[in-house]
Image: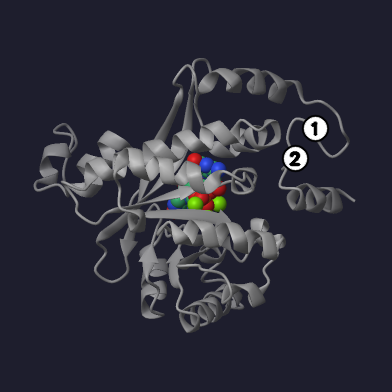
Amino acid sequence: QADMAMYEAKRAGRPMGVFDTHAQINPQLVSLEADLHRALPQQELELHYQGIYRAGVREVAAAEALLRWRHPDRGLVNPDEFIGLAETNGLIVPIGAWVLREACRQAAAWQAQQPGLSVNVNLSARQFWQPDLPEVVLDALNSSRLSPHLLTLEITESVLLDVPDAAQTLGALHALGVRLSLDDFGTGYSSLSYLHRLPLHGLKIDRSFIRDLGQAQGVAENIIRAVMLLAHTLNLHVTTEGIELEAQAGFVEALGGDHLQGYLLARPLPAADFERQVLTPNQSTELHVDPLKPTA
Ligand code: C2E
Ligand code: MG
Ligand code: MG
Ligand code: MG
């Protein structure tokens, strides 16, 4: 029953939020929602950036923009706590437009320091189905002067439940020259049949598969191997999310994965920290060692 409600909500592109499955109001979420209306005008939103690295050489190739809400009382709020609300009440549309502009502006500014660095921006289902999405994306590109091929839009499989309509939007975005990537691959209602018909550049294997590496039956290993083979057969780039351990990175690299993302390589960081720690590797790490701490 609850599964069905979630399925219907996903189909309609509206996640569960203020109302739970029993249609009761959650007061905590109601107050958070009231605050969310002020977040954008009060400039409480910010983007953090997580490096995406080329496998093998481990050089940074891209930055994924990840939204954070600096709430005056609650501190830093993660997207999982408010994106669902923003989708339900539609605020994700103006917020998403801001994310696109800000991420493109930042990526353009970083070109001097790191030529060719691209930026990944997450699109929610609600945003994806706005008829003016291609114009919003074009506007972000024009105002930042970022090359379109340096912008990758990440969408989840759920938007592809309606393949014919999604194909039209994807085609319009593709025509702008931006890249399209399927996020959290393997967790949605995957239909392999669409993969070769849509103008996709790559897919990101969900971190749950990486997390399950090393378990007795080797199921995650086999899934990752199969997805990688399928993706490469279809000329799609493969990014693996949630790499926390060297063994996980090594496994993916041995299979020929293209990009790595995860805490092992870099955590999501505020722009200034990303610039210092990811774009300009420390010449002398000693500078950051606490002098009071004994060194091994
Ligand atoms: P996502 O797009 O799949 O982003 C990856 C999430 O995994 C991020 O969580 C990131 O911090 C986390 N992560 C990265 N590496 C590791 C790791 O090694 N281990 C673990 N345990 N986690 C890792 P975050 O920043 O909390 O974002 C959660 C989700 O919120 C994102 O998942 C994305 O779906 C959504 N989101 C974030 N920013 C935006 C945005 O600007 N717009 C929209 N529509 N959604 C966003
Ligand atoms: Mg993503
Ligand atoms: Mg993901
Ligand atoms: Mg995710």
- For mark 1, what is the residue? 19
Above or below: residue 84 compared with residue 55 = above
Marks 2,1: beta carbons within 8 A: yes
Rendering coords of residue 193 (x, y %): 66, 77
Residue 268 in view, yes or no: no
Q: Is residue 254 left or right of residue 36?
A: left
Q: Is residue 293 left or right of residue 163?
A: left
Rendering coords of residue 178 (x, y %): 41, 57
State the mark number for residue 16: 2
Which of the 4 quarters of the picture holds residue 105? top left
Disc 2 to disc 1, C-alpha distance: 7 Å
Q: Residue at x 55, y 17 (%)?
A: 38
State the mark number for residue 212: none
SS under mark 2: loop
What amino acid is labelled 1 in the image? Phe
Above or below: residue 287 compared with residue 71 = below
Decide which of 291, 161 is in the foreground and name it. 161
Residue 14 in view, yes or no: yes
Q: Residue at x 41, y 74 (%)?
A: 251
Q: How many residues crowd mark 2 within 10 Å: few (<14), some (14–19), many (20+)?
A: some
Which of the 4 quarters of the picture holds residue 117? bottom left
SS under mark 1: loop
**Which residue is at the far left?**
284
What amino acid is labelled 2 in the image? Met
